[in-house]
Amino acid sequence: AQGRAELMVASHNENSIRKCVSQMRRLDMDPSKTPIFFGQLLGMADHLTFTLGKQGYPAFKYVPYGRVAEVVPYLLRRAQENVAIMKGTKADVQLLVAELQRRMGFRKSQSAV
């Protein structure tokens, strides 16, 4: 809509995302009606994207594309900037294991939220 601003919170930082979500809740902003979106690089911070989506926040994965000589340095910079992301790797593995167990019938569906 004309005159309407939108915001993409493109962050792998869990604390930054928590602050944004907390502020949205404090302001009683409905995630399905507010033009605030969250995005993470494909393969990074999947636990954040999954949790945001399960809670009704618009969450996206983005994929950089281009020549390898351009994309690889970009990805390396993101990895260096986001060393803390590795803390989320354990959460990602736990989510994957739980989903595999659910799909194989070993456990019932549980919310990761």
Image (spheres, rainbow, N blue to C red):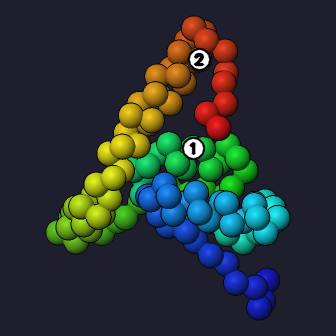
* Percent position of residue 60, x then y: 56, 57
| Residue positioned 66% across, 24% down in the render | 110
Residue type at the position of mark 1: Phe
* Percent position of residue 5, x then y: 70, 84
Return the residue nearer the eye: 22 or 49: 22
Return the residue nearer the eye: 19 or 9: 19
Graded by Cα atoms within 10 Å as few (under 14), some (14 to 19) or many (20 or more), the crowding at tag 1 reads: some
Q: Which mark is residue 50?
A: 1
Q: In the picture, which quadrant includes the C terminus?
A: top right
Identify the secondary structure beneath mark 1. helix
Are the two marked residues, 2 and 1, in contact with CB atoms closer than 8 angstroms? no
Using the rendered view, name the quadrant where residue 76 is placed.
Answer: bottom left
Return the residue found at the far bottom.
3
- Say whether residue 100 is left or right of residue 76: right
Residue that badge 2 annotates: 102
Determine if residue 71 is in view.
no
Return the residue nearer the eye: 11 or 84: 84
Residue type at the position of mark 2: Arg
* Percent position of residue 41, x then y: 42, 57
| Residue positioned 65% across, 60% down in the render | 21
| Residue positioned 44% across, 49% down in the render | 45
Identify the secondary structure beneath mark 2. helix
Structural distance between the alpha carbons of marks 2 and 1: 16 Å
Graded by Cα atoms within 10 Å as few (under 14), some (14 to 19) or many (20 or more), the crowding at tag 2 reads: some
| Residue positioned 53% across, 15% down in the render | 101
